[in-house]
Image (cartoon, rainbow, N blue to C red):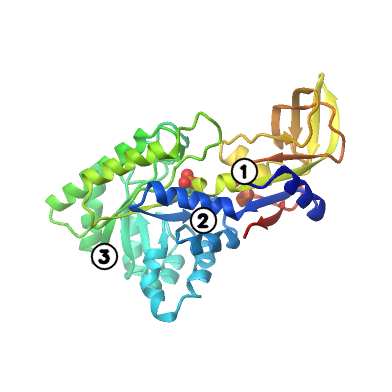
Amino acid sequence: MVSRAQLQKLAQRHGTPLFVVDHDEIRRNYATFKRYLPRVQAYYAVKAEPLPEIVETLYKAGASFDVASMPEFRIVHENIKRMPAKKRQAWIWDKIIYANPIKANATLRELDPYKPLVTYDNIEEVRKIKRHAPHAGLALRIRVPNTGAMVELSSKFGAAPGESVDLILAAVEAGLVVEGLSFHVGSQTTNFENFVQAINLAADIFREARERGYSRMNLVDIGGGFPAPYDETVKPFKLLAEKINAELERLFPKDVEILAEPGRFMIATAATSVVTILGKAVRDGKVCYYVDDGVYHTYSGIIFDHCHYHMKSFRKGPEQICGVFGPTCDALDVISMSEKLPADLELGELLYSPNIGAYSHASSTYFNGFPPAKVVHVNR
Ligand SMILES: *Cc1c(COP(=O)(O)O)cnc(C)c1O
């Protein structure tokens, strides 16, 4: 963990707003994932935080990658290109899944020479893939229960259980190869039963496909959704892993490859935001701090990710419920209406938010002329 003294020193040297990425923590998270889910290959979901330095660290640690756009594909491919030429083609499936069920024709054409592994969940996409990326391997994205996830996805993607095998056979009839199934239980899933149900659903579909004559499927991608330990209500990852391992062991023979696409789990705890207090006012009796980062920038997860980040002070003082606002002129730019902070902080003092690595800096904008926070990497 980056110490508070180190955060202050970095803020002095680089200025704020600052997004401090701790690569030791990324490596620790990856190691934890592998230790408890040894059968599962982790494909880091690049969209959680796509900085190339992070991709490189995870690549060196042995991770693979879930990408959903060509720019994300290229960030990962930069690392693959450093492999000896002979190994590259063999490596692309091991290293990348293109896990966006809806792809532009131009994207498919660009992907095809790599013989990529891509997901799909509808018949129009089968026709597109046949036409523009016939060398792709396919994974059918199935719809699974998302109850209890912080971010729900089941209304946007996934084939219904009743149509899944039809979609597999339709792709096969079109001359494509369906390698397996994928799902996503929804982000920050704290209801571990969702994973259990989803794995069982996948096993049912494997069985039905076999009964209807297709037995070439050999991979299951159990997606993302592994929760970050934002607070003590999140049960330990070890418990989730035990449930997942038990179901995989029971339902899928050893030769079925298991993939996962953890995003948040790898990166949430690995970044800290440091901000400076720019202004202060008392409104309706409440102390309000105005800081140099906000919801259009590193704190964008408040809007897009339904996530709440704590603001902490570097020094103690008599605490009160305070408001914390971002630097833009927009009324939406509220970090918190009720954050417990010392009421006597002065302009120029620093605040920080730990555990802000996922879906934060990744969706920063230039709104109102304020650029994204500066990124600093430590322990790279
Ligand atoms: C966003 C996404 C992920 C990552 O989800 P996390 O909740 O961050 O683990 C994985 N797979 C797919 C298909 C996604 O869209």
**Taking 283 as reference, is 246 left or right?**
left
Quickly name the residue at label 2: 46
Q: Are marks 2 and 1 in contact (CB under 8 Å)?
A: no
Q: Position of residue 276 (x, y in %)?
A: 80, 42
The answer for how far apart the CA atoms under marks 2 and 1 are is 15 Å
Other residues around mark 1 within 10 Å, as few (<14) / some (14–19) / many (≥20) = many
Quickly name the residue at label 1: 356
- Residue at image point 43% right, 31% down: 148
The vertical placement of 74 against 257, above or below, is below
Quickly name the residue at label 3: 176
- Residue at image point 52% right, 50% down: 28
**Taking 256 as reference, is 104 left or right?**
right
Q: Position of residue 42 (x, y in %)?
A: 42, 54
Amino acid type for the residue under numbered disc 2: Val
Q: Quadrant of residue 103?
A: bottom left
Q: Which circle's residue, 3 or 1, is located before the other in the chain?
A: 3
Mark sitting on residue 2: none
Q: Residue furthest bottom?
A: 85
Q: Secondary structure at mark 1?
A: loop
